[in-house]
């Protein structure tokens, strides 16, 4: 593409070669350069390769300098310029600015941009009857729409996306070739005449309706009739139903075998969201181009069925983030209403399996759940789940990092040449993500999920292959968790053997703290960390989960300075599913009679006999230092949740009860003891037995469950702050990080942060990757990168 060069201004003429790196492909960057060159009367050209955008620009020296400044300052909305390097060239006397064809390129690959919600201009056209893209379900431009989810390979051109099979019509081709058009070189661009098409299908695959309006009409009718619709979105399928229809919600729960785990809802617009939840300052995040699900306090009496998110007092709300979503909610051209204004919008998968993103998998796996499929013929190259952010008074708390954010990198401080070695981190067993480190940055994949099934492990392999393919990389080091039973560890060891490269096992909580240090650029400095979670394999082959660590040696090593005292877990996973059993063992350990609380009534005779024998014999349980299990103890002991149907349910409902009581009552709760002791080898320890005794005594005295739930959070926050303060005094390190899945609990996060700051300590919390296992791969990659530079001790001392 050639842009005619205007008459040049007077002055000395120079020519510069510039290389621009960052998120500069798929975001309208070359059109931006062409328009800028035209404005400044410059000539030359630009092109993509797999590593960057290359530019040669010629004209008056002052105009060329202005071009270099404005290529960054005036960059397109989705661009992220990370570096611009340049040098002088001989003047060539070009007569135009030319956008050249893409080239393969050598060296570090450029960044794949994330998917984003439709921009204001596209939405305006979507609902403008005079526009040729009126009600086109795939409207997009260089400023918005699908990117990662349609990318097959780099450099990012239409031929390397899943739009390759849709040749442009004459009108779209004209826009695509016009440097002044918003769709100039927009790779997903299409219209009704040349783009993908909607279809409504029955569970067996039979086409019920084809084309935008017939397919939409069928889906809207099904949703309004209380049926379940599988909807193909940006990165995979959703299962949707009317959120206010209690029967539809219960039908979805029954078919998906998901009795209690909360569903997210999609609200038609921000005003509708305001009828569901207390939006407040979270409105900016809800309406952002990333469009995450945001967890917010539910409004009493909001237009959703009680079983959408039972027992929580909050809802996960997302706004429409594809043109198709907007069309579903909008009134139809004939004046008939669109879909109900609030829809349950949950991941399209069988519980425990990965997200369905191909039409074949969706029909095969969701046919027993959905009554209708609203689908289309644009393939999804990279499956991408919705991102989830919890909202607190201090802003967003990342819970799942995926659509809108992945795969943007986290930068490491520039290091020695060894920092350019490719490190591949296998991630955790639950909430898995994969990370690749190269050239002083880590690329964390979108959410993969739990690796319990063959299908999920295949998804893990596919995501890894895509990540390595995008970066044309072969790892020099594999990094994984130490847990001998983790599928991710076994996978890493197999791949390392195939590639004949070393594998590094990093202790779980060390990786959590390293992830936090990495996202804050603090790997070069010592960092104290409270790392609280449910399960992490410890260096002594027991289950850890309430750790005070000192990260040192640029993240390569960690010292265990303290931990939670023993919380016994009976029967492994069965104990996790039955918090009442863990509570009973904790009561027996603390000298509390089982008959003194409702725990005794909840236990079966067989459970009571087994637990009594286990306590007396010292067998039949696993020792843990897990704060997650302590949450289970508290939740069951005070009668909030005895048995769970989804991960962390007891802890989540305990947090909800504490938050509701604090909001409603706002009075002082009982003070519970969680004393800090010091062992003979100088390791600090939080003793849970007095806490258990205090909870049982307060319950017997008539304290409300919500008051005790809040008192538990306060006790843990105080004790965490005290143990960290003692470590700060002995080490001289005054910065404390909070990581691990327990710290997605926003009440505990806020309370612990406040107590630490009261003691004059600086606090770091997660802002870019989750505190839970979704962030673990970043920490593994960070430790692995440092290990390449200098070998790493195997375990916290």
Image (cartoon, helix red, strand yellow):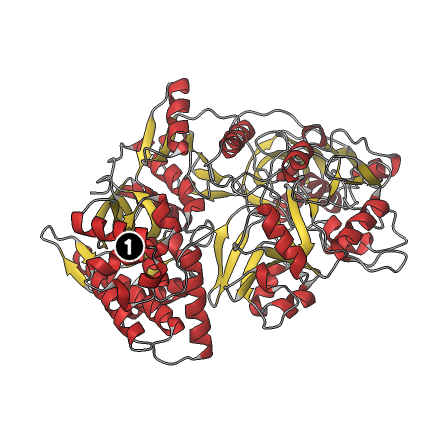
Task: Tell me where residue 237 sits by quadrant.
Answer: top right
Q: Which x, y percent locates residue 700? A: 29, 74
In front of the other: 238 or 521: 238
- Looking at the image, residue 394 sits to the left or right of residue 64; the answer is left
Q: Judge whether 247 appears above or below 36 on screen.
A: below
In front of the other: 315 or 76: 315
In front of the other: 243 or 614: 614
Q: Name the residue under label 1.
A: 608
Q: Which x, y percent locates residue 63? A: 67, 45
Badge 1 crowding class, 10 Å Cα cut-off, few under 14, some 14 to 19, many 20 or more, is some
Which quadrant of the rendered structure holds the N terminus? top right
Task: Note whether residue 28 is visible.
Answer: yes
In front of the other: 593 or 290: 593
Q: Which x, y percent locates residue 152? A: 63, 30
Q: What element carries label 1?
A: helix
Which quadrant of the rendered structure holds the C terminus? top left
- Looking at the image, residue 724 sits to the left or right of residue 651; the answer is left
């Amino acid at each position: 593409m050639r842009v005619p060069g205007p008459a040049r201004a007077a002055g000395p003429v120079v020519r510069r070669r510039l290389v621009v790196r960052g998120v500069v492909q798929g975001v309208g960057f070359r059109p931006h350069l062409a328009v800028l060159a035209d404005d400044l009367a410059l000539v030359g050209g630009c092109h993509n390769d797999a590593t960057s955008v290359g530019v040669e620009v010629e004209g008056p020296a002052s105009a060329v300098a202005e071009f270099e400044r404005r290529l960054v300052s005036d960059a397109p909305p989705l661009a992220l310029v990370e570096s611009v390097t340049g040098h002088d060239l001989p003047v060539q006397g070009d007569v135009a600015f030319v956008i050249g064809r893409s080239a393969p390129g050598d060296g570090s690959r450029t960044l794949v941009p994330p998917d984003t919600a439709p921009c204001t201009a596209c939405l305006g056209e979507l609902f403008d009857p005079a526009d040729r893209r009126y009600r086109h379900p795939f409207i997009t431009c260089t400023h918005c729409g699908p990117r990662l989810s349609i990318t097959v390979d780099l450099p990012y051109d239409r031929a390397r996306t899943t739009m390759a099979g849709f040749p442009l019509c004459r009108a779209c081709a004209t826009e695509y070739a016009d440097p002044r058009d918003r769709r100039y070189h927009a790779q997903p661009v299409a219209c009704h005449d040349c783009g993908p098409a909607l279809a409504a299908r029955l569970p067996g695959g039979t086409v019920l309706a084809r084309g935008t309006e017939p397919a939409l009409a069928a889906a809207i009718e099904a949703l309004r009739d209380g049926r379940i619709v599988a909807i193909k979105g940006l990165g995979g399928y959703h299962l949707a139903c009317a959120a206010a229809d209690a029967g539809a919600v219960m039908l979805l729960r029954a078919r998906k075998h998901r009795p209690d785990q909360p569903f997210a809802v999609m609200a038609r617009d921000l005003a509708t969201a305001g009828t569901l939840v207390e939006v407040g300052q979270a409105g900016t995040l809800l309406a952002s181009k990333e469009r995450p699900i945001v967890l917010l306090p539910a409004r009493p009496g909001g237009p959703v069925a009680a079983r959408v998110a039972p027992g929580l007092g909050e809802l996960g709300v997302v706004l429409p983030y594809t043109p198709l979503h907007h069309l579903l909610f909008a009134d139809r051209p004939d004046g008939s209403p669109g879909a109900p204004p609030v829809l349950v919008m949950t991941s399209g998968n069988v519980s425990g399996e990965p997200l369905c993103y191909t039409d074949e998998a969706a029909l095969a796996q969701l046919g027993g759940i959905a009554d209708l499929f609203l689908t289309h013929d644009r393939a999804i190259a990279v499956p991408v789940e919705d991102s989830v952010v919890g909202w607190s008074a201090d802003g967003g708390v990342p819970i799942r990092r995926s659509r809108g954010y992945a795969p943007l990198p986290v930068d490491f401080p520039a290091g020695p040449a060894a920092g350019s070695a490719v490190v591949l981190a296998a991630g955790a067993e639950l909430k898995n993500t994969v990370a690749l480190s190269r050239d002083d940055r880590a690329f964390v994949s979108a959410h993969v999920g739990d690796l319990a099934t063959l299908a999920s492990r295949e998804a893990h392999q596919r995501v890894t292959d895509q990540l390595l393919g995008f970066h044309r990389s072969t790892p020099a080091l594999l990094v994984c968790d130490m847990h001998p039973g983790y599928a991710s560890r076994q996978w890493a060891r197999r791949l390392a053997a195939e590639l004949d490269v070393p594998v590094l096992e990093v202790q779980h909580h060390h990786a959590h703290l390293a992830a936090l240090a990495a996202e804050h650029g603090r790997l070069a400095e010592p960092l104290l960390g409270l790392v609280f979670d449910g399960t992490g394999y410890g260096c002594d082959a027991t289950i850890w989960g309430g750790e005070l660590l000192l990260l040192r040696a640029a993240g390569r090593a960690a010292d265990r300075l303290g931990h939670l005292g023993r919380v016994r877990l009976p029967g492994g996973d069965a104990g996790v599913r039955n918090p009442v059993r863990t509570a009973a063992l904790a009561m027996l350990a603390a000298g509390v009679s089982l008959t003194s609380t409702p725990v005794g009534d909840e236990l079966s005779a067989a459970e009571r006999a087994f637990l009594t024998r286990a306590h007396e014999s010292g067998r039949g349980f696993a020792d843990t230092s897990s704060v997650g299990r302590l949450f289970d103890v508290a939740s069951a002991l005070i009668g909030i949740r005895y048995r769970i149907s989804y991960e962390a349910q007891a802890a989540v409902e305990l947090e909800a009860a504490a938050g509701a009581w604090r909001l409603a009552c706002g009075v002082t709760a009982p003070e519970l003891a969680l004393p800090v002791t010091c062992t003979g080898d100088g390791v600090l320890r939080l003793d849970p037995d007095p806490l258990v005794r205090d909870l049982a005594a307060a319950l017997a005295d008539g304290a409300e469950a919500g008051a005790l739930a809040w008192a538990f959070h306060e006790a843990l926050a105080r004790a965490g702050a005290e143990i960290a303060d003692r470590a700060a005094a002995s080490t001289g390190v005054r910065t404390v990080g909070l990581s691990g899945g327990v710290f997605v609990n926003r009440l505990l996060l806020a309370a612990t942060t406040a107590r630490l700051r009261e003691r004059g300590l600086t606090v770091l919390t997660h802002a870019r990757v989750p505190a839970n296992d979704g962030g673990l791969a970043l920490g593994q990659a960070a430790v692995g990168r440092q290990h390449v530079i200098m070998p790493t001790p195997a375990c916290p001392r």
